[in-house]
Amino acid sequence: MFKKEMSKAELTELTVAYLKEQGACEVGVVTKETLAGGPPSTDLEYVLTDAASALSFAVPLDEEKVSSFLSKKDHAGHQEDNIHTGFFITGLAVGLASYLDQIGYLSHGVDSNIVYRKDTPRGSRDFKPDISHRYLAVRSGVGWLGFSGNIITPSHGASVLLGSVVTTAELEPTNPLPEDKKYCDECRLCFAACTSHLMDKEEQSIVTMGGMEFSYQKRRSYHRCDLVCGGFTGLSERGKWSTWSPGRFPIPDDDHEFRGALVEATQAWLKRPAIEDGGFRHPQSPGGRKLNFTCGNCQLVCHPDKEERNRRFKLLSGSGVVIQHADGSIEAVKPDKARAHLDALDDEQRALYERI
């Protein structure tokens, strides 16, 4: 097989340039050695036999559409941008992998999202990724792990999507970003923006890769994210604002109560009219219905500039409460108007949105 002979430095420079030329805002490189001792989702050989290295990269989301999403002025804009950016990242990863393969280095472009391992106890229902973009990103210096566990980048904060390319090419690893430059000051606006309270208030998770430790706030049951980010419910604790979900079923404090809460909320969701402004297909979606982006707020409020961070949270907390009309359309209104809207429904219709 033809192989273009290049030094490690030349090949690394080429691959990094390839990604940046196509719109990546941050790029880093990990190797099997720098990932040694990491979780199963850092095993590069899971997706490619004889893998030696991987490139990690971030692509920014449209910040104007993020603001419109948080303020409830526009739902479809950010949703479309998020979906298409994910597809772009997958295509970019496959493109670089194909390029490397053509010059003699077998490679694999990892999907940006919604690909899960099938060899866990419950298979893809365990939602374990084939490769963790987050862990590759923090180890390679694409960003830091913020309080929320999201990757926060120096240029765009957490409002990015991540991609990875695993390769048999031996590349030069890049260093993690220095901790003293990390902008996360534990303001906890990500926690305040999460109606599911996914993050533990006190306990941290620590991940060790290549002899280095990385920490973020421990995540409670992922059923919390299923319930809220799945779009089944989303009213804030005090009822002053919501996610883009019109559902307002209870969000339990006890993790053990989430299975029942999910069953209740998803059964109601299946009877609600579909939101007709896009959406995406997910292999684990109840009934095979399309899902919609209704949250992601912990990611979207986080920005390197503290004033912008505060502004985004104010947009969210002052954005009102979402209701759904009979035609499936959704609208953000003031809490008292939302209450009047629900009270005007008959019991059968009202039960699609809240417990009665």
Image: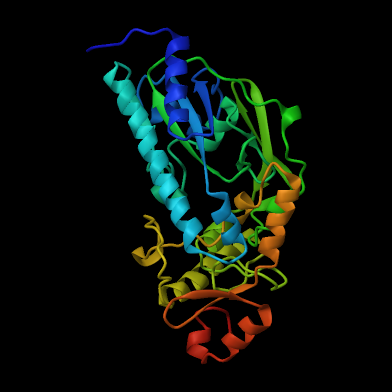
> In the rendered view of the protein, which quadrant contains the N terminus?
top left
Q: Nearer the viewer, residue 124 or 295?
A: 295
Q: As displayed, is residue 188 above or below residue 151?
A: below
User: Taking 250 as reference, is 171 left or right?
Assistant: left
Q: As displayed, is residue 215 above or below residue 113?
A: above
User: Taking 327 as reference, is 255 left or right?
Assistant: right
Q: Nearer the viewer, residue 120 or 102?
A: 102
Residue 196 in picture, x, y percent from top left: 63, 60
Please tell me which residue is depicted at 69% across the width and 73% down the height of the picture: 239
Please tell me which residue is depicted at 74% across the width and 53% down the height of the picture: 310
Residue 250 in picture, x, y percent from top left: 62, 72
Q: As displayed, is residue 85 above or below residue 349?
A: above
How many numbered discs? Answer: 0
Please tell me which residue is depicted at 28% across the width and 11% down the height of the picture: 3
Q: Nearer the viewer, residue 114 or 87?
A: 87
Please tell me which residue is depicted at 67% across the width and 78% down the height of the picture: 335
Residue 95 in picture, x, y percent from top left: 33, 31
Residue 334, quarter of the rendered image: bottom right
Q: As displayed, is residue 105 above or below residue 295?
A: above
The answer to whether residue 115 of the structure is visible from this angle is: no
